[in-house]
Image (cartoon, rainbow, N blue to C red):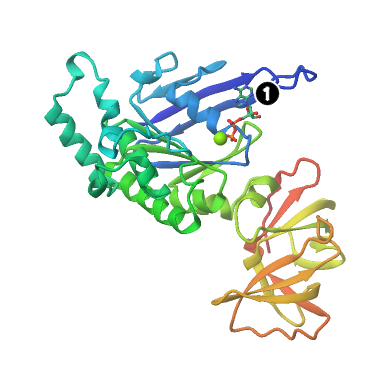
Amino acid sequence: MKVVLQNLTKTFPSRNKKVKEEVVAVNNFDFEIPDGVLVGLLGPSGCGKSTTLNLLSGLQKPTSGKIFFGENDVTNLEAENRGVGLVFQNYALYPHLTVRQNIMFPLQNLKGTAKLSKEEMNVKVLEAAKLVQIDELMDRKPGELSGGQQQRVAIARALVKMPKILLLDEPLSNLDARLRLQTREEIRRIQKETKITTIFVTHDQEEAMSISDIIVVMKDGVVQQIGKPQEVYDNPVNLFVAKFLGTPPINVFDGKIKSGKLFVGEDAIMDIQADTDKEVYVGIRPEGFVLNENGALRCRLNTVEVMGRDISVVSYNDASATDNQAIRSIISSENTVNLAAEYVRFDVKPNKVFVFDKNTEERIYFEKE
Ligand code: ADP
Ligand code: MG
């Protein structure tokens, strides 16, 4: 089922009594989520991710704007009539009920023609449990399960009514690193098998990038960029998006455009087709550096971190936009670096270099030579 957010806005009164200004948690969201995809809503804490999910689920009503599921305007429809499945960070299972009873719970509240017999319920519960591979543990209580297993039960409970839309709010945050990886692959598999349109909220860029067909990058209640993860990574529209995606993060320098060249500090790192000279931010992805003893960009060598397949050369440059921020470059481990040297020099890969306006922090586009 496709989901349309139309000029969707949600404001809250300020929590701080001294500040009159209201909080715009969701600011004029206007986009469409195609049927059957997994969308990652991504942004730092407080950017409006949970509010967006609450509006979609019907737990909160928008201040203005509309929500459509398919062609149906559901803006004023109650949560229980929207056909959505919800999974939260804290699994919110009933501790005194078994796994089976927890998963069955949403089915027991069905009324009228939707009402199911005990046998029908058992079939559906087992189906959902099998999907998340928890069917061996049906008679346990939540307290007897690991965090990952509890989250599977919560997902099964959300799936048992075969929702049209599945909403997951930071579902992996309470899991340890290994379980997080495993469970996110599980979620991906389940989504592919069921083809349920799924909206997955996280503040973890790597998680969003790895699991999503489409990511929506948000900041302060405003959508910054929507696209396939790789496209957004390769083509960030502003400095915020460039900095938010990627580990190690992009390296940002104070730079300038002068006479057709792009400068980092005093080093002309590449030719550029620009008519006007100006000060800019220059962002270089870690994989955009090439070791070259005659390279254009000179940095003070600090150390080399071994990462197995790659090495990370850690260095410093006075033009770094954040003072004393180490510059991290990712280089194939076939290269050797003389650690006794004071400086290290790099060439840059033009398609890994982005230029941003100093005031607006918007991307400046041009032909790279
Ligand atoms: P996220 O899930 O991305 O961390 P939220 O959607 O929870 O962000 O919150 C977005 C903004 O709205 C924050 O500034 C938060 O403080 C504010 N907010 C959320 N819920 C309420 C509420 N019930 N009352 C007042 N402010 C709220
Ligand atoms: Mg949240």
Residue 30 showing in the rendered view = no
Q: Residues within 10 Å of mark 1 (few under 14, many from 20)?
A: some
Task: Establish if 319 lies above or below 295.
Answer: above
Quick check: 97 left or right of 362?
A: left
Which amino acid type corresponds to the residue marked 1 in the rendered image?
Val
* Quarter where residue 237 is shown: top right
Q: Residue at x 31, y 33 (%)?
A: 97
Task: Establish if 172 lies above or below 247.
Answer: above
Q: Determine which residue is flagged by label 1.
A: 23
Residue 326 position, x and y percent, is 76, 64
Q: Secondary structure at mark 1?
A: strand
Residue 16 position, x and y percent, is 74, 22
The one of 39 and 267 positioned closer to us in this rendering: 39
Residue 183 position, x and y percent, is 40, 51
Q: Residue at x 50, y 20 (%)?
A: 60
Q: Residue at x 67, y 17 (%)?
A: 13
Residue 251 position, x and y percent, is 72, 60
Task: Establish if 222 lies above or below 280.
Answer: above
Ligand 2 resides in the quarter of the picture at top right
Task: Establish if 230 lies above or below 173.
Answer: below
Mark 1 lies within 8 Å of ligand 1 (Cβ measured)? yes
Q: Residue at x 58, y 75 (%)?
A: 310
Residue 369 showing in the rendered view = yes
Quick check: 183 left or right of 363?
A: left
The one of 128 and 20 positioned closer to us in this rendering: 128
The quarter of the image holding the C terminus is bottom right
Quick check: 128 left or right of 6?
A: left
